[in-house]
Amino acid sequence: MMSLSRLMSRAPAPVFPAIGPGRQADVERLLSRSGLRAAATPRDAAILLVAGDIPGTAAAPLARVHDQIPRPRVTVSWGHDEPDAIAARIAEAWREVCAGGEGEGDRLPDEPPNKWKGVGPNGQGGKGMMGGVPYGRPMAMTGPDIRDGLQLDRYTARFGPFAPMLPPGLVLEVTLQGDVICDVTVETQPFAQPADADAPDLCAARMLRLLGLAGPADRATAGKKPRGVWMRGAVPGGLGSVDGAGDARDRLSRWLSGTPVTASVPDIPALLKGAEWSEAMLILASLPPSAILRACQTPEAA
Amino acid sequence: MTLTIVLLGATALVGIGLYGALSQQSFVMLMMGLELMLNGALLAIIGFWSLSLGGMPEGQLMAIIVMAVMAVELAIGFALIVAVYRKRQADVTESIDTLRQ
Amino acid sequence: MLTFGIILGWAVLSVLFALAVLPKAHATAPQAMPFLGGGTPDTHAWQRFHFRPYTMSLLFVAFEMEMMFMYPWAVVFVEEGIKALAEMGMFLTILSVGILYGWREGIFRWE
Amino acid sequence: MTDLLVALLAVCAVWTGWRVFRVDSMVRATFSLMLSFVAVGAIGVLLSAPYIGVATVFMMAVEMMVMAIFMVMFMMNPAGLNPMSMVHQHRVSIGAGVLAFFGLAAAILVSRPPSNPVAPDADVVTELGLELLGPSMLIFETAGVTLLATMVGAVILSSRQGRFGSADEGSRPPGLTEGGDPAGQRPDGGGGGHHHHGGHG
Amino acid sequence: MIVLLALVVLGTLLVGTLFAAMLDRSHLSIVAFFARQRVETEAPDRLNRDLAPAWYLTLAGAGLSVVPFAPGLALIDSPVGIVIWGSCEALVIVTVFLHGWSPNAPFPLIGAYRYAAIGLPVMLPSMFVLIAAALPAESLSLIAIVESQREIWNVIRQPLGLPLFLIVALAMTLRGPMDYADAADIATGTSAEASGAGRALWQTARLAMLVSVSAIAATVFLGGPLGPLLPGPVWLWLKTAALMALIVLLGNRIARTTPSRMMWILWVVLLPLSFLHLLISGLVAL
């Protein structure tokens, strides 16, 4: 048993980052190191890395993400330590996790989202076929679609602020039909990041990750030239065009050649509405964090 | 003996398929019943071909044609459902509303 | 019979292995919530999912039937020679018309 | 031995076929139907029809995948979270099913089909190929035309946008408002073909 | 003899999976996750969630069983070997769909449907290249396909075959440019809610499928067990290992486009290419 836990602890530490204001670039650089692995979902993580001061509005989401990590789990807070020190602490936490034990308990109470007890002759959630809250949640209902007019179910949810494919802090309320965005509003604006987060290599790495190139993205983060095939071509043309900054593909080209991009303020919901989820995420990643923040600060977008 | 077993199985599939096709309220479930009946037909054809017809190639061709019929039924059936759903969308949502009460 | 037995054997072996290594899943209510990056959903995720390329999938079902004819054709291809090539060429040309039509109607994309 | 296996598989096919109408989740129902097909395919493999048997599995896996997609798309409560019975004329249907079963079963038990099994060393795939290219050539090509008609019919019936735009529009989404700019992408042009948008029913 | 062959196939699958994990540098992570908590999601489809990885493993095993380990010697000596493999491919789509459907969560659901949209058209090039390989062999059996490559390997005789099949292999093993089920923009898609041993088992099955699909590609295009000096199985292992490394490399290097665009590419570019491939192979075989 001892040897098994030692074997486990030699695996890269799976870290789910909760990035606070001003720490995006630090965390991205940290997680591109070997020995650490950025998990895309808390289910794949054992360590929650909380970087910076998470504002009060994001406390409940942070608790949710924390609780979604399987047990045993450890939270590592990153205040103002050096990256080396924090990497050592994460490694220590991972060894602790591998040694077993209970780990941290839940932060949220163990209550279902809605009280539910099967009712009716067949044990359903409420009256009729679609009524009630079976297993604690209501069911999705049909609504108009914006593409082909086939009115099927609309799924509404708030994504963020710690979604790995969205800028840290940004909360979008999205209504999806299939994987096409029918409606989107900005609930909370992203956390402010220093100019460092707009660095071309980091921006390129964010897009490369969405294109399935984790390895080249790590190289780009480390300041090396990413080795990939069809990196620019994989981004569909005409995606997320912004006045003066071209489309997503142009911006990726510029970042790959090391030129920073300054985009004029786009209206985020207008850019995302009607796009497929994969396109929408590419559009967001193709805008520098400062531009997204500016766009969300304008009154009509809020 | 084997043939009898196979044919009884095929018959049972046809029976269940018929039950499904007649009893289900929604058109989509009705298609399931039809597919099940065709499944029974396929089983019977395989059995006859293998055990009673001495493996004449037409038997295999027949089985392929049954499968083609399934594919055609599936494609046209669902295309019709899409077309109807699109046309009578208001009605469909209305009926959903009635059910929701 | 052997073919059947071996494949069944694989299935039994895999299921037994899965049963052996998979512990029972358990979770508290906050742990069980679907992951949305900290956000919350309004409803269950299971829904009448709007599969965008639905026309493509119907076209595919019809087109894919051609495989049933192609496998036996491939076996006798060399034996029958140019006649086999011509017949399959005609068959595929007929079906390609359907694909071209679908392409023209723009079904090979998210609708 | 073969008899026993065939009987077991037939029972599997019937049982999974029955489950189709007894489970709440549409996905489970569809893949239960797929298992029924797989059992029939396995019987085919046992009864010296390797090609037809395996091809049944192959074709039906694909068809049931498509079926599952459509079942979930158009059935209310597709995952069966609210279990409910959606049947009508239940007794009549059961009666019809049972009647069909017993009628056909009696016919099978009474009639004695000739026993003439496939020769064990027959190359059935080659025979099928020769049949397709030889005597049944017309059936083969007719099947092609039928499939073409199906493809065209399915596209006409189910596709909506196709009637307006041409293929070179690529994956540009339609306008958000009637005749408006396309959503998300390329503000210039492209919404022109979609005036009918939003006007359904 | 059968028992020996079965053991060889099982051993190849186990060692190959370990090798694949090493190539992927994920072996330690997988081991670590077998010991972690398995989180239950809200009202999941438990049966399908637990069975999906098992089916994936089954399909990997069944696919590997049709591969001849020496000329004329395969565990499943079926006259329709490539159709059996085709069924495995079709069932992989179903399995991945079930894996994404079962947790009742949005990201896995989107991943499952994306995979269905891509996996179905991917079947077409796959079937065309396999049928093209069957033309010179005059048989659907993989043993006969190996025999037909005694003089010249299919990779030279049918130049488009291997590239097209590698695309299929990437899709079958959920890798790189064809990994629409587990993409980064949906937080690893169908696996987004899989944790602990369930996640580890799914990853293991995915690597086992890499062994299977590489062995099939080695058999169909690189002559399988044919080769000078060394015994048949060794040649097969070497070729399989080389193809596994190639597939992992391609998966790590090629960018993934959006699913909508990839579907268009599959129908409009790759399908005509496979028609062309079939025509070339047919003319060469005559």
Image: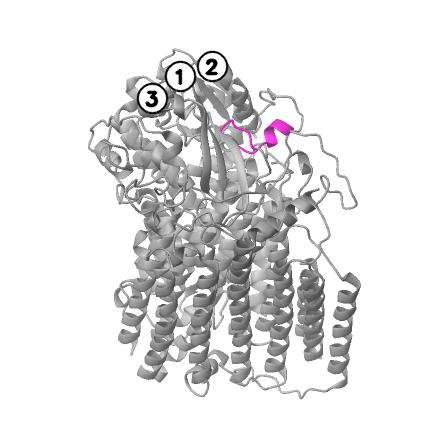
First reached walking from the N terminus: tag 2 or tag 1 = 1
Q: How far apart are the alpha carbons under marks 2 and 3? A: 19 Å
The answer for which chain carries disc 2 is: A
Q: Quadrant of residue B34?
A: bottom right
Residue E146 in view in this figure: no
Task: List the residue tagged with mark 1.
Answer: A21
On the picture, is A73 further left or further right than E69? Answer: right
> Residue C31 lies in magenta, yes or no?
yes
Q: How far apart are the alpha carbons under marks 3 and 1? A: 15 Å
**SS class, disc 1:** loop
Q: Residues within 10 Å of mark 3 (few under 14, many from 20)?
A: some
The answer for which chain carries disc 3 is: A
Q: Position of residue A79 (x, y in %)?
A: 42, 12
Task: List the residue tagged with mark 3.
Answer: A294
Indicate whether D111 appears above or below E72: below
Cβ–Cβ under 8 Å for marks 2 and 1: yes
Cβ–Cβ under 8 Å for marks 3 and 1: no
**SS class, disc 2:** loop
First reached walking from the N terminus: tag 3 or tag 1 = 1
Q: Amino acid at mark 3?
A: Arg
Label disc, if present, on residue A55 of the rendered structure: 2
Q: Quadrant of residue A81?
A: top left
The stretch in magenta equals C28-41
First reached walking from the N terminus: tag 2 or tag 3 = 2
On the picture, is E57 further left or further right than A299? Answer: right
Q: Position of residue C86 (x, y in %)?
A: 32, 80
Q: Quadrant of the N terminus of chain C?
A: bottom right
**SS class, disc 3:** helix
On the picture, is D188 further left or further right than B84? Answer: left
- Count of labels in the image: 3
